[in-house]
């Protein structure tokens, strides 16, 4: 019998060793995705175009409509947080395409024959979506700064912002992976992606406050995880920004939804190879 | 219009009866046993428990039986080949033994673990080189190996040395930091073998490892595999369409026909059975028979996979 490749180091307890191995597997999957980005960052630049268009064209025009601003903040301040969240969502929501692509090529099989738990694979992929999301955030921050948005640069706010961007991107990337596991082809995924993304975006507080929505839409928006993501991002991005639900509540909602999605995705991802 | 699908759907049902009857002949009929003994030329060192023991392994896709009660065993360190026409069930068996595809009935012990109840343990001890690509073209060779090292939890202090060794043994060291999408088909295959071996598995599964490669690349891959068999005691289970490869590489061969295993033996024993001066091609023609008939999705899937693998590696 060859020496077991995952023999724990002698000093560590077995539990600590398995937690360490799990972390290493998550990190390995995520690191590979980031390495791909460093080899070919072109995609990051093309992705950056979308927030620019939304902020410069849509944001600047809508800023002239009175009555949209919420809680005394200017509309361009209000929407820059929404656009930041949106660009993170759009990066994440097409993540399932990559999974389908890997399945078609055969790369998926290398993951599935490895002893890595399926949840570690799913979380690794999801976190790498978070890294992409961060690059989008940098673009929006720079752009918003140029538009004289009252950006908060307090270190605590920035650190929490990183946490929320990664959490939000990971959540929607995992959702996307679930859709990919179900539909299995790129064509069907593209169709579903459009159908899902727009309602998620419009039934949230991203580009207008919940207060102007009809009651039924407001109820839908309250169930939309994106609303909690926007709420936290808005509070953390802007000087004097305040959260409607509380940052803690926002994070709890996102974490709980993420945990459920990972559990579902792990089951489906394992079967994607057959 | 309504008659045709009805008739088509009958075909797989009838086809699946044939291997069932063939395998009955093998076991029960004295004449059949003479023709296709199930364990001809079995290596004498079988005292050690087999590293792979497949017991009545079966896989159905809907009503179609892709793998029909296949049983065989492979000894530690042995190089075992599976041959058969498109759709005969080679890849399906490999995908089940590597835990990728659930088993419909029967079972197997792989590297000492039960395939159905302990898939996680099985995965730790096997390496797999699939027919399609398993190296990521958007990463360098080294990064691909690093990903494998992390997925398998290879101890940190050993990672560098193991990756260096793997690159050297597959003759890829000069290209370690180049993106794999610039590699030739043979180089990609050798990298995939390096990936499959990095965690020093007890068993390496290879599904059509040379499909789509030019003769020089094919020789390089086979050369590396033969060296692996000599230098380590890694058990190898390989499928192929190229009889001369199987003949050169394998100590024992299993012949599949429409999902059933119709013969197992050394290349010499199988050839002697078919006739004097027979080649393994003759064995294939005599035992594996014609390609699967119409209406069998597995055959289509196999053909499509082979074409795609050929395109991506060629």
Image (tube, rainbow, N blue to C red):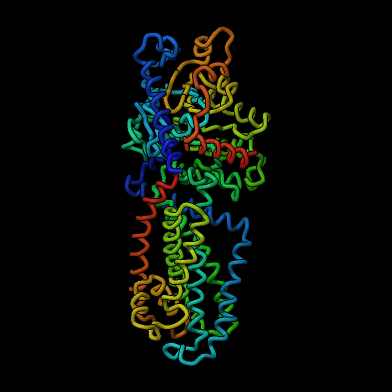
Residue B207: percent from left, percent from top? 52, 33
Picture quarter containing residue A123?
bottom left
Q: Is residue B74 above or below residue B204?
A: above
Q: Please count the marks in the image.
A: 0
Please give the name of the residue rendered at 52% of the width and 11% of the height, measured from the top-left corner: B274
Q: Report x, y in % for residue A169.
A: 46, 65
As drawn, which residue projects farthest toward the top? B276
Image quarter (top left, top right, bottom left or bottom right) of the C terminus of chain A: top left
Q: Is residue A21 visible?
A: no
Residue closer to the observer: B253 or B227: B253
Residue B150 as seen in the image, left or right of residue B140: left
Q: Where is B145 relative to A237, above or below?
A: above
Task: Identify the residue at image location x=47%, y=36%.
Answer: B295
Q: Nearer the viewer, residue B228 or A95?
A: A95
Give left or right: position of B268 versus B11.
Answer: right
Residue B308 percent coordinates (x, y): 58, 41
Comparing A188 with A21, the one in front is A188
Image vertical order of residue A188 relative to residue B13, above or below: below
Q: How far across and down, in percent of the image, does residue A81 sit?
A: 48, 78
Which quadrant holds the N terminus of chain A? top left
Residue A200 seen in this snapshot: yes
């Amino acid at each position: 019998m060859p020496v077991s490749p995952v023999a724990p180091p002698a000093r560590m307890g077995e539990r600590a060793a398995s937690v360490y191995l799990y972390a290493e597997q998550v990190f390995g999957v995520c690191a590979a995705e980031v390495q791909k980005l460093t080899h070919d960052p072109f995609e990051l630049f093309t992705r950056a175009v979308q927030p620019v268009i939304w902020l410069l064209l849509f944001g600047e025009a809508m800023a002239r409509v009175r009555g949209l601003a919420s809680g005394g903040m200017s509309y361009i301040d209000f929407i820059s947080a929404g656009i930041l969240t949106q660009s993170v969502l759009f990066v994440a929501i097409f993540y399932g395409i990559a999974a389908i692509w890997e399945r078609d090529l055969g790369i998926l099989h290398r993951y599935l024959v490895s002893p890595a738990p399926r949840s570690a694979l799913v979380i690794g992929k999801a976190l790498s979506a978070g890294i992409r999301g961060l690059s989008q955030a940098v673009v929006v921050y720079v752009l918003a700064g140029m538009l004289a948005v009252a950006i908060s640069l307090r270190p605590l706010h920035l650190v929490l912002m990183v946490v929320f961007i990664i959490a939000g991107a990971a959540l929607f990337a995992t959702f996307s992976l679930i859709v990919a596991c179900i539909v299995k082809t790129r064509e069907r995924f593209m169709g579903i992606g459009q159908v899902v993304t727009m309602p998620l975006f419009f039934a949230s507080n991203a580009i207008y406050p919940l207060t102007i929505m009809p009651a039924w839409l407001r109820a839908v928006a309250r169930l939309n995880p994106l609303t909690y993501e926007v709420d936290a991002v808005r509070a953390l991005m802007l000087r004097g920004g305040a959260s409607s639900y509380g940052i803690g509540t926002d994070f709890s909602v996102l974490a709980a939804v993420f945990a459920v999605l990972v559990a579902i995705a792990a089951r489906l991802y394992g079967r994607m190879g057959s | 219009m309504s008659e045709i699908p009805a008739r088509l759907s009958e075909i797989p049902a009838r086809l699946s009866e044939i291997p069932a009857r063939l395998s009955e002949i093998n076991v029960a009929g004295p004449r059949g046993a003479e023709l296709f003994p199930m364990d001809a030329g079995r290596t004498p060192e079988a005292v050690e428990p087999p590293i792979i023991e497949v017991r009545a392994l079966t896989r159905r896709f809907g009503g179609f039986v892709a793998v029909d009660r296949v049983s065989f065993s492979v000894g530690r360190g042995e190089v075992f080949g599976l041959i058969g026409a498109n759709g005969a069930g080679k890849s399906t068996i490999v995908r089940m033994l590597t835990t990728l595809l659930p088993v419909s009935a029967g079972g197997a012990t792989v590297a000492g673990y039960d395939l159905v109840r302990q898939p996680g343990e099985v995965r730790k001890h096997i390496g797999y080189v699939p027919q399609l690509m398993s190296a990521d073209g958007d990463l360098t060779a080294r990064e691909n190996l690093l990903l494998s090292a992390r997925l398998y939890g290879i101890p940190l202090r050993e990672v560098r040395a193991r990756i260096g060794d793997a690159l050297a043994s597959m003759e890829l060291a000069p290209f370690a930091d180049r993106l794999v999408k610039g590699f030739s088909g043979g180089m990609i295959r050798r990298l995939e073998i390096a990936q499959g071996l990095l965690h020093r598995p007890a068993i390496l599964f290879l599904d059509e490892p040379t499909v789509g490669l030019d003769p020089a690349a094919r020789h390089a891959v086979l050369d590396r595999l033969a060296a692996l068999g000599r230098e380590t005691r890694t058990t190898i289970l390989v499928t192929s369409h190229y009889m001369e490869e199987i003949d050169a590489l394998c100590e024992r061969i299993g012949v599949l026909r429409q999902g059933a295993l119709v013969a197992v033996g050394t290349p010499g024993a199988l050839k002697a059975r078919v006739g004097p001066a027979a080649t393994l091609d003759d064995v294939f023609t005599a035992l594996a028979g014609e390609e699967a008939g119409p209406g069998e999705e597995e055959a289509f899937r196999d053909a499509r996979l082979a074409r795609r693998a050929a395109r991506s590696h060629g």
